[in-house]
Image (cartoon, rainbow, N blue to C red):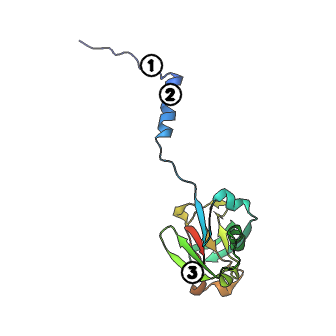
Amino acid sequence: MTRVYPEPRPMKPRIALFALLFSLLSLPLQAAPKLTLISADRQQVLDRDQLEALPQTTIVTTSPYFEGTATFTGPTLARVLDALGVSGRSQATFQALNDYRVSGSLDELLSLDAIVATRKDGQAMSVRDRGPFWIMLPLSERPELDDPLYHRFMVWQLSGIELE
């Protein structure tokens, strides 16, 4: 005896919508990238939107860390530090997501014309692409900075800046 099964019925729109919403809710939420600024008496957290709301500077440069020329956009380091207040501070430490840390005198760091890049070639940088934030130096415009002495300050996956 051959059994005949009924044709599957299409899912009702409400059930389909419920299934879609449930699947979206079960996706892991990704936290928006944030940069933590710390001083002895204050802490401030800035997200990408807040960094991009500051006046933007563009650096077009080559680097030993990527092929060819790339365009980076973000606020200058000086503007970012102004958000925390730099008066009376003499030292800054940059920290990356992988706990890489580098320190330098604030005067030296501010003299490098660095930006806190939020975008590379117009695209928001992901952790995979050395983002979400990358201290970028104008290596092509200032060839004297294209030296390991200064490369150490080009912290990618930047997560924090501490002022002492």
In-front residue for pair 104/16: 104
**Counting residues from the N terminus, which is met first, the one under dot 3 or under dot 1?**
1
- Residue 85 appears in which quarter of the rendering? bottom right
Whether 145 is drawn above or below 59: the answer is below
Amino acid of disc 2: Ala
Question: At which x and y percent is residue 35?
Answer: 60, 64
Question: At which x and y percent is residue 155?
Answer: 57, 74
The mark closer to the camera, 3 or 1, is 3
**Counting residues from the N terminus, which is met first, the one under dot 2 or under dot 3?**
2
Q: Which residue is depicted at the point 74% across and 65% down?
A: 56
Label 3: how many Cα within 10 Å (few below 14, some 14–19, many 20+): some
Q: Which residue is depicted at the point 71% across and 77% down?
A: 87
User: As drawn, which residue projects farthest toward the top?
Assistant: 1
Amino acid of disc 3: Ser
Q: Secondary structure at mark 2?
A: helix
Q: CA distance from mark 3 to mark 1?
A: 65 Å
Instruction: Write down the residue under mark 3.
Output: 103
Whether 56 is drawn above or below 6: the answer is below
Amino acid of disc 1: Arg
Q: CA distance from mark 2 to mark 3?
A: 54 Å
Instruction: Write down the residue under mark 1.
Output: 9
Question: At which x and y percent is residue 134?
Answer: 60, 69
Quarter of the image containing the N terminus? Answer: top left
Q: Secondary structure at mark 3?
A: strand
Label 1: how many Cα within 10 Å (few below 14, some 14–19, many 20+): few
What mark, if any, has residue 16 been given in the picture? 2
Left/right placement of residue 149 relative to residue 87 reads left
- Residue 124 appears in which quarter of the rendering? bottom right
Q: Secondary structure at mark 1?
A: loop
